[in-house]
């Protein structure tokens, strides 16, 4: 019986530090919260049958989802910028700004 191929077998060595990896995870969590906040607002707009607002919010949520997919721990400046932007945007979306 042959051993299954390891999922890690063809991975390149990491080009970022542990701190960079942790900052990246924090940024991803921030993005997830932003996407969730948009989802709540979309649901509210649907309940209010505000089609234009639903479309606007959906486009914003889609943009954040795409940003999540393009973020990399190797770009610490972008990771830090995303984290800061998420904090500001979440306060705004949650009405606490």
Image (cartoon, helix red, strand yellow):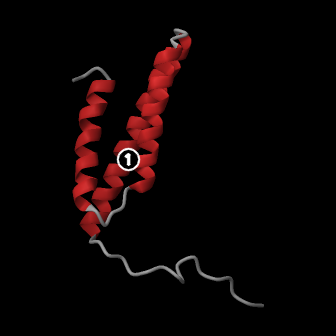
Q: Nearer the viewer, residue 67 or 4?
A: 67
In this rendering, the answer to whether 67 lies above or below 72 is: above
Q: Position of residue 16 (x, y in %)?
A: 29, 72
**Residue drawn at 33 percent across, 63 percent down:** 73
Q: Position of residue 30 (x, y in %)?
A: 34, 43
Q: How many marks?
A: 1
Q: Is residue 78 left or right of residue 36?
A: left
* Element under disc 1: helix
Q: Is residue 75 visible?
A: yes
**Residue drawn at 46 percent across, 18 percent down:** 53
Q: Which residue is mark 1?
A: 29
The quadrant in which residue 95 appears is top left
Which residue is at the far bottom?
1
Q: Nearer the viewer, residue 5 or 48?
A: 48
How many residues crowd around disc 1 within 10 Å: few (fewer than 14), some, or many (20 or more)? some
Q: Is residue 40 visible?
A: no
The quadrant in which residue 86 appears is top left
**Residue drawn at 28 percent across, 57 percent down:** 23
**Residue drawn at 68 percent across, 82 percent down:** 4
Q: Quadrant of the N terminus?
A: bottom right
Q: Is residue 15 left or right of residue 6?
A: left
The quadrant in which residue 24 appears is bottom left
Q: Is residue 22 left or right of residue 5?
A: left
Q: Position of residue 90 (x, y in %)?
A: 31, 32
In this rendering, the answer to whether 48 lies above or below 66 is: above
In this rendering, the answer to whether 14 lies above or below 75 is: below
Q: Quadrant of the C terminus?
A: top left
In this rendering, the answer to whether 23 lies above or below 49 is: below
Q: Position of residue 9 (x, y in %)?
A: 54, 83
Which residue is at the far top?
48
């Amino acid at each position: 019986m042959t051993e299954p191929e390891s999922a890690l077998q063809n991975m390149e060595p990491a080009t970022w530090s542990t701190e960079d990896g942790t900052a990246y995870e924090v940024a991803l969590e921030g993005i997830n919260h932003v996407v969730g906040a948009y989802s709540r607002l979309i649901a509210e707009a649907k309940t209010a049958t505000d089609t234009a607002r639903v479309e606007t919010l959906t486009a914003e949520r889609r943009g954040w989802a795409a940003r999540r997919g393009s973020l990399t721990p190797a770009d610490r400046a972008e990771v830090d910028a995303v984290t800061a932007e998420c904090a500001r945007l979440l306060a705004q979306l949650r009405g606490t700004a």
